[in-house]
Amino acid sequence: MPFIQVTMLEGRTVEQKHELMKKLTDATAEVLGGDPQRIRVAFYEVGKDDWGIGGVPISVLRPDA
């Protein structure tokens, strides 16, 4: 059973997350074969102060993001 974990910055809409979940499931089933009902997807949302690039938080690097 495939288990897909997606880590991303917070701020996406519920609709965007649902669409991504569906498309990831469909693509995984197509490529790997098998029953889409056995594919799991989990989203982990990270705050802009909790994600850094080069030691600098995203909230500082991209304040409008």
Image (cartoon, rainbow, N blue to C red):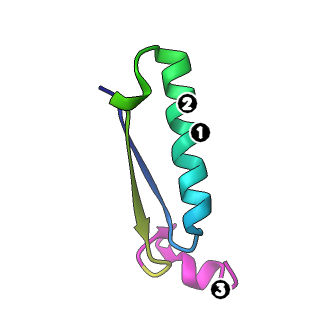
Residue topped by disc 2? 26
How many residues crowd mark 3 within 10 Å: few (<14), some (14–19), many (20+)? Answer: few
Residue topped by disc 1? 23
Residue at horizontal 49%, vertical 22%?
29
Name the residue type under label 2.
Answer: Asp
How many residues crowd mark 2 within 10 Å: few (<14), some (14–19), many (20+)? Answer: some
**Nearest-to-viewer mark from 3 and 1:** 1
Q: Is residue 25 left or right of residue 60?
A: left
x, y (%) of residue 27?
57, 28
Residue at horizontal 70%, vertical 84%?
64
Task: Verify CB contact (< 8 Å) between mark 1 and mark 2.
Answer: yes
Residue topped by disc 3? 63
- Give the farthest residue toward the top: 33
How many residues crowd mark 1 within 10 Å: few (<14), some (14–19), many (20+)? Answer: few
Name the residue type under label 1.
Answer: Lys
Residue range in magenta is 50-65
Task: For marks 1 and 2, give the CA distance.
Answer: 5 Å
Name the residue type under label 3.
Answer: Pro
- Give the farthest residue toward the left: 1
Viewer-proximal residue, 23 or 45? 23
Task: For marks 3 and 1, give the CA distance.
Answer: 30 Å
Which of pointers 3 and 1 lies earlier in the amino acid sequence? Answer: 1
Image: 34 above or below 55: above
